[in-house]
Structures are given as structure tokens and as C-alpha cells.
Amino acid sequence: MRDWLTHRARATPDATAIVSADDDETWSYEALDRAVEEAAGRLCALGIQQTDTVALLLPTTVTAVGLFHAGMRLGLTIVPLSNRLTPRELADRIERSDSALVVCSAETEQVAVEAAGETPVATVDEPQWEGVASIPETEPAEIEPYEWERSDPQLLLSTSGTTGKPKLVTLTMGNLLASAVASGFKLGIDPADRWLVTLSLAHMGGIAPLFRSTLYGTTVVLRSEFEAGRTADDIDRHGVTIVSLVPTMLLSMLDSRGTLSDSLRVVLLGGAPASTALIDRCRNYSVPVFPTYGMTETASQIATARQSEAFERPDTVGRPLLWTDVTIVDSDDEPVSPGEQGEIIVGGPTVTPGYYQDQERTSEAFCEYGLRTGDIGYEDDDGYLYILNRVDDRINTGGENVDPGEVVEVLLSHPTITDAAVVGIPDETWNERVAALVCRSDESVSADDIDAFCRERLAGFKLPRFLTFTDEIPRTVSGTIDRSTVREQLLSFAKSIREAH
Ligand code: ATP
Ligand code: MG
């Protein structure tokens, strides 16, 4: 199989491939194909060869999209880097991935050069390519399109680092293809679809629509930066039918607009747990929400609930995608019955072959039934999946297990609490104690008020023993709570309380 754009440009050359909402430019598949051919030629002229690894440090723009396609045309492995990372973190990814080149834009050039070390850097500022560091300015070279095998690595992606040092996940052509096809069956494909991409292209949620849309022959609407009101306008103005969002984004859009354009047929909502209150709000305002559960290691979606399913069962993430096997196992890795909790194991063609050059973490991650997600959940009798929390997040206090998700849910049901994170912090007597970091919309609400509220709704051992306020819950790029920072903040709060007593 050649790169998907080659096939697409032949099939529907005049169809719109990309609308850039930043500058209102439109690219047909034929025009994109030509630009990609040129970009691929320039990469070759820089000495890049088939199966090389190339890192991209670019904002969500047409240039970046073109380079993803150029990578597929040439048989490269692409390492998308987030521009939210520090030079030190970037250097780590560039080195660990064995990248032969770092491609950046004028805005990211300084950081890229600092992070790249010995690795050559090229700045691409359409339509010119300028070599930085060791690369002279180039003319495009003749290229030879790559013939892909399903097992060829196509992407090296960092996980979000919620549970520790981010892992570098290998995703193959087969993983991407299976994910694109299975997702198409789940969401349906309408040739008139317009998929708004405003998530970072360093994560699967941002990358997946780029390739999928090329396979489906639909349109991608690009916006380099998310801003709640403007993104809602983009949806209106460009007749967007699908958008992928993390819950914090959807919340801020609903806060700013009340509801969203009725051109939407799918709001794919994932990356982090969505509260039932948010799903209820979507129901009340007819927002077509599709809660989804996925991870980097599975090239995004594992399970997705369609709108009707979500409105019927507001806390489910739906049923697994076609070909994806979900098994829930107990602590002895034995499958459990429907309704029983355990770790979620995923198998099937979207699952990564492993972490790049990390045999140890790879073998730890797999068991008989597939990949350990590190997430706790259960399936109901009808095969719907529910996510509870992460294996590492369970709080053990005085011998009792507390699910932080349950405490968060109660906190969020308080009328003035807008966001919350709950973690366990070490305690000599109790092993761990429940601690909560909370955002409130009304400053006059005190920790005691919230305690009284929780006491009516939670057993004593589940009550937050330490509770403090903040303006914003620290989160990773994908919207999951940055637990180590939350824990640090709560630890120092608990310390100050303990010292005061
Ligand atoms: P790391 O693996 O480095 O600790 P991470 O797991 O957060 O980071 P990602 O691959 O970006 O990195 O995120 C996948 C995880 O996000 C899932 O394992 C799950 O914990 C969480 N997640 C994704 N979607 C949902 C959802 N709908 N509900 C609850 N959790 C979700
Ligand atoms: Mg993970």
C-alpha cells in the first residue's frame, strides 16, 4: 500500500482536503498532493531516506499536515513533538527516538535548535525551506514512493506521562489502518463530513483525523489554537460535522456558548473522564456527544458510545470498536464476570507492538489477553464499558479502598464546584488519606461547607480529610489530571495543616 493521499488524490482530486481556519485557505486533494510531493522531495534532498525517523515540532497547520503525509509517502517514521514541552523534554524525545532530522517552524526554531543537539534541524516556512544548523537550502529531489507493510512503524508517540515518565509508543501502518476503518464503522462516514482539528498534533487525537479523513475522502478544518468561543465559531462558520475534544474544552465551549452549532453530528469526547453532569448538559442542549475511551498505545479509540447510547447510559464509554477485544481481569489476571471490576486489557489490530527500544516496559505491559491499560473498569451485561480509575490511583485508607472518581463525582455535584481532583496522600496511621483539590465559582463557599455536603453523600472513610482550593486543576495536554503535581500541592497543604496543629 502506498501513502493514502496518493490514492485519494487520484480518486477525488477536486474534493476539499483541508480548510485552514487560521487564514481561510482551502486545499483540494490535488493541491495537497502536489505540496506533499514537493515536501517529500525536499526531505529527500536533505538526505532523508526511506524508513528514517523524522521529528516534527510544528503547530497545527497545513504545513504540519503536509509533512505527516510526506512521511507516509516516503516510508518514514514520524515523531510528533508537542510545543508545550521544554527543550530538555524535547531533547529526550529526539534522542530516544533516534531521529535523523527535526523539522520546525520559524516560531519553534529556537527551541528546536536548542533541543536537537547534534541532530540536524530544518525550518519549514511555506513555501520556502531553509536549512538551519548543518543543512543548506535545498531543491526538491526526485522521490520514490514507499510500499508499506502493515508492520512498518509509522509513528513514535509519547504518552501523556500521567503515571510517570512518558513512554514512546510505536504505532504501525497496520495500527493506523485498523483504527481508521473501525472508527469509520463506529461513527459512520458521510462524504460531506468536515472534521475540526484543534487538538495538538503531538497526540493521537489530533493526528488520527488527518489520516482518516484522507482515507474517507472528507475534509479537515484546521485551527492552530483552541479558544472556546472562537472554536465554537469555527464550527458554525465552516459547517463542521465532527470535532474531537477533551472534556475541559467542551466544558469551556458550553460555558461560553450554551450549546454548539447544529451542523455537528459527532462530538468525540475523550482523553479523560467526562462527568455525568457534562453528559447531562449535552443531552439538555442536544449536543451529539460520543464519549470515547482510548489511549496512545491503541492509536486512539478503544470503545466509543454513540449519542443515543450516551444519553441512555451517561457514564459509559460504549462498546469496543470492531476488532478490538476488551477483557477485564482480576489481580491474578483471570477474566471476571460482567459487572465485576478489574483491570482493562485490550487486544486487536490497533494495539501497538510495543514501546520503542524498551523491551522491559513492553513485556511488563502485555499479558495473555493483550495490553494492560492500567485502567480499572467493568463491562455490563450488554457489553458496555465503564471506566472507574487507574490501577495506581486507588486510595487505600485504613484498609478500605476508595475510588477517587466517586469522590470527584460527589464534589462536582456541588453547585459551586467547577472542577476537582482527588488523590491519596501518605499518612502514618491510615496508610493514605483522601485529599482534594477543588475549583469553586463562589469564594464564600468554605471547606467546611463542602465537608458538610460530602458527609451527606459519602461514607466517612471516603471523605476528603484535606481539601484546598485552586484556580485551575493541573492537567496534561490530553486533559488528564496531572496527578503528581496535584499530589505535590496537596502534600504541602497537608504539611502546613499538620504543622499548624
Ligand atoms: P502515561 O501512559 O504516560 O501515564 P496517559 O496514559 O495519560 O499517560 P494517554 O495515552 O494520552 O497517556 O492517555 C490514555 C489514558 O487516558 C487512558 O489509559 C485512560 O486512563 C485515560 N482516558 C482516556 N479516555 C478516557 C475516558 N473516556 N474516561 C476515562 N479515562 C480516559
Ligand atoms: Mg497510559
Image (tube, rainbow, N blue to C red):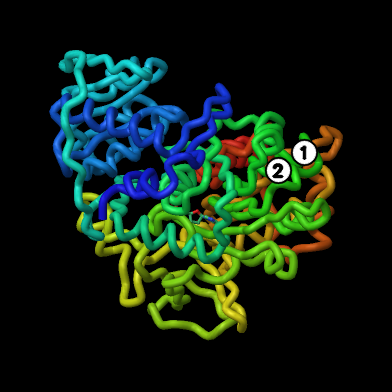
Horizontal arrangement in the rendering, residue 317 relative to residue 148 (left or right): right
Residue 145 image point, x, y percent = 20, 43
Q: Are marks 1 and 2 in contact (CB under 8 Å)?
A: yes
Asked if residue 228 shows in the view, the reply is no
Residue at disc 1, secondary structure: helix
| Residue at 77 percent of width and 34 percent of height | 256
Residue at disc 2, secondary structure: helix
The picture quadrant where one finds residue 323 is: bottom left
| Residue at 40 percent of width and 37 percent of height | 30
Q: Which one is in front, 3 or 413?
A: 3
The picture quadrant where one finds residue 73 is: top left
Amino acid carrying mark 2 in the image: Leu
Amino acid carrying mark 1 in the image: Asp
Q: For mark 2, does the 10 Å Cα neighbourhood hold few (<14), some (14 to 19), or many (20 or more) residues?
A: some
Which residue is labeled 2 in the image? 251
Which residue is labeled 1 in the image? 255
